[in-house]
Amino acid sequence: MGKPQGARPVDREKLKDYSSLVFGALGGAMTAAMVYLGDHLGLFREMASGEPVSSRELAERTGLHERWVREWLYQQGSAGVLEYAGDDRFSLSAEGSAVLAEESHPAFGAGMFSSFPQTIGVTTRLPEAFRTGIGLPYDAFGPEGAHGIERGFAPWFRSLLVPVALPRIEGVVPALEAGARVADIGCGGGVALLEMARAFPRSEFHGYDISVHALERAEANRGEVGVENAEFHDAAQDPLPGDASFHFVTTFDVLHDMTDPAAAMRRVRAALRDDGAWLICDIKARDGYEENVARNPMVALMYGMSVVSCMSSALSEPGGAGLGTLGLHEELAREMTKDAGFSSFETLDFGHPVNAFYVARP
């Protein structure tokens, strides 16, 4: 075939490199799918000890078919997720165990893969969003999506929120110990709220969310924990009251997902006492594409997640703000909280690889 009229000349070496880049992304998707299976089938948990295993041994321990386990091992080994020990035996490193097998470890990340099929599946609905400008709410991912978000954030909440984060916020722990009123906006499965409720039985805790699936998870988790000082609310029907009755408010990774974050900030201000505090946790972001690319090694992942979920949620109603995953950088957060009526804004560094933390006060 002849060269199409007007086609640009192609450098063969650059073509090879570019093809490797594109198909490497497809390879990453396949690896992610295998991580999902490893988590879902309990394969990583069975390998948590670090002992090298064969496909036959792993299949016997998990009750799975050896041939399928063997191919899974080959894929995860070739991707570098597992270590090859020779003689068709594979192991999971201590670091791999922390990330993929130990759900209580702060670095645990397999939960983020637990809704991978739903995350990929929703892309079939996005062409319409590109045409209309209207995205999808988080409930578009179904119950699995809510559970995946919960598992993704729960390790940090359970290991670091109460013992590390709260003591860094002046005046909060004494207030909670004495008996305070607390709200978590966008509470999801309620793990953060329930951890605080267990630690501070004299205080009263209220979780607010608009996701039906998340609220179902929150109620189930509340039953398992057995606390009596926590309550969950459907924010669409029972919103945060603007009665200045709350001593402490938290928002964990939700502001950039909201269709109207400015209104949410004003509501938080109306709900807080004049001596209250608001803990804001959101994605570490910079002001502009170039700075995000230069300083964030996960920038491509985050822009992709924004299209699939975060920005989509933030545009799920006409006129949505559409901030997206990397849309709420520190300077914008400062400006927006000031506009909402807050006079104080400080940053806290907990060494989190993804999230930034701020405290705003009236």
Image: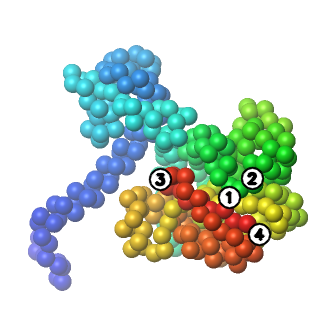
Is residue 1 left or right of 253 when viewed as pictured? Answer: left
First along the sequence among labels 2 and 1: 2
Where is residue 144 shown, x and y percent of the image?
59, 43
Name the element at disc 3. loop
Report, in whole angstroms, how far the alpha carbon at label 4 lies from the one at label 2: 14 Å
Q: Secondary structure at mark 1?
A: strand
Q: Determine the secondary structure under disc 4.
A: loop
Q: Closer to the N terminus: mark 2 or mark 3?
A: 2
| In this view, the mark in front (4 or 3) | 4
Q: Which corner quadrant of the image does residue 344 belong to?
A: bottom right
Label located before the other in sequence (1 or 3)? 1
Amino acid type indicated by mark 3:
Pro
Position of 9 relative to 20 (above/below): below
Residue topped by disc 1: 279
Q: CA distance from mark 2 to mark 3?
A: 24 Å
Label 2 neighbourhood size at 10 Å, few (<14), some (14-19), many (20+)?
some
The residue that disc 2 covers is 172
Q: Amino acid at mark 2?
A: Val
Query: How far, Cα to Cα, is label 1 from label 3?
Result: 18 Å
Return the disc, 4 or 1, that comes first in the chain's sequence. 1
Q: Which mark is residue 353?
A: 3
Numbered circle sitting on residue 362:
4
- The x and y percentages for residue 13 are 12, 64
Q: Mark 4 belongs to which amino acid? A: Pro
Contact? badges 4 and 2 (CB < 8 Å) = no
Q: Residues within 10 Å of mark 4 (few under 14, many from 20)?
A: some
The kind of residue on which mark 1 rests is Leu
Residue 146 seen from this side: no
Residue farthest to the bottom? Answer: 6
| Dots 2, 1 in contact, CB < 8 A | yes
Q: Nearer the viewer, mark 2 or mark 1?
A: 2
